[in-house]
Image (tube, coloured by chain):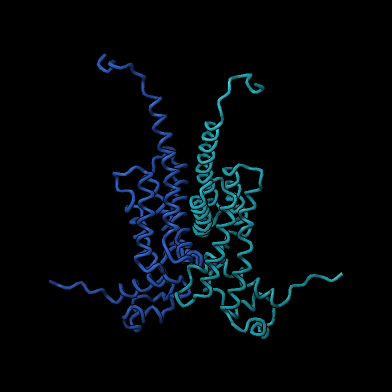
Chain colours: A blue, B cyan
Amino acid sequence: MAETIASPRDRFIAATETMLREAGMAAAGIKDVAVRSGAPIGSLYHYFPGGKTQLVGEALRRHATRLPLITARGFDGKRTAAAAVQAMFNAAADGFERGGADKGCAVGAVTLDLTSDDAALRTICQKAFDAWVDDVAARLPVPDPRARRSLAVTIVGAIEGSFVLARAGGNGQPFRDAGKWLSVLLAGIEGKRARRSARRRPSRTPGSSKS
Amino acid sequence: MAETIASPRDRFIAATETMLREAGMAAAGIKDVAVRSGAPIGSLYHYFPGGKTQLVGEALRRHATRLPLITARGFDGKRTAAAAVQAMFNAAADGFERGGADKGCAVGAVTLDLTSDDAALRTICQKAFDAWVDDVAARLPVPDPRARRSLAVTIVGAIEGSFVLARAGGNGQPFRDAGKWLSVLLAGIEGKRARRSARRRPSRTPGSSKS
């Protein structure tokens, strides 16, 4: 059986992703990436002729595929939305702490580090967030599409903001706090829907179900 | 009358603050700060013998004093908490767009850019967020101190996360979305309190108020 050894290209991308999560664009210098990856720096420009911008772009695309995993950890198809959002944020808190409490979201960190010259990278960040918002929206019990999307933006924003506060404080509690209050919000929304649909059902007197 | 001309020291700090808001630590190189400030680079090490770390620290402290102004724009002492939080986030959206949609929170951006070596700057970021959370908590209609603080963490996190999404999309809508849903949450909390306190009042029959 062949062992799966990561190619130099994959090792460069993985190292860049980790470094962006730790310290944004400031930390992801080409030389530092090469050292961290353990792959020969000589091959870096072979794989990434576009240099740092191309490398960071690939690392962001890779990180973007992981973002919906955060959603899926809570929204398992069995829980209520209120329970799911709390589970999602609790899982994010646990993952943050397990990872050493020193790694945020690569897309969020890079977004705040981009000047107006970095249009290509900003587009990658914007698309990553848009796809994640769509993924969250598809799981929410809100019939109106605009309201559903705006609630999904709020939830994704809360995750990104929790990364900021959690990094500052060095623990995952901000995720748990946000998850708790968003869960209260979603329980209210689900309760309202349940009451509405109960009113819409024709009222029945006991024993009338067979009439 | 003496004109108020900013000292070179103030100009260095103001330029650094703006550059951190635009692009985090990556952009705030000493030379670039000097160019942006218009003050002579030769005097920079005179005012900031600690170099970039000292300069960034001063810029963060300056920015930290502005954060509670975001709260105050919504919580004016007249509105309900639900209306106040929506007004706070709408004002943040307007300010973000008026400023060119390219400037976030300096404290948030730096927090995501710090490696574990930057303990001094991280402490400044943590204190800035703690003070802002205290400021928000003091305005919330939640009697239990732990719940009140955790709701304040959620609101501050939502502002920081909105900066991330707003920077990615280039407009202030994420603030307005988060403000709307946090306002729904707060209206629920205020409604529950009102119903509870109504139940606690002794019930009166009409006309009994003078008995």
Q: Looking at the image, which is closer to me, A46 or A36?
A: A36
Percent x, y of residue B129? 54, 62
- Would residue B17 be found to the left or right of residue A2 on screen? right
Q: Is residue A137 above or below residue B106?
A: above
Instruction: Residue at 43% x, 75% y: name it.
Output: A28
Q: Is residue A144 above or below residue A135?
A: above
Q: Is residue A162 above or below residue A149?
A: below
- Would residue A118 be found to the left or right of residue B16 on screen? left
Res A34 quadrant in image: bottom left
Q: Can residue A29 be seen here?
A: yes
Percent x, y of residue B63? 61, 66
Residue at the limit of the structure toward the left, as seen here? A1
Instruction: Residue at 84% x, 71% y: name it.
Output: B2
Residue at the limit of the structure toward the right, as seen here? B1
Instruction: Residue at 48% x, 62% y: name it.
Output: A165
Percent x, y of residue A100? 37, 69
Res A116 quadrant in image: bottom right
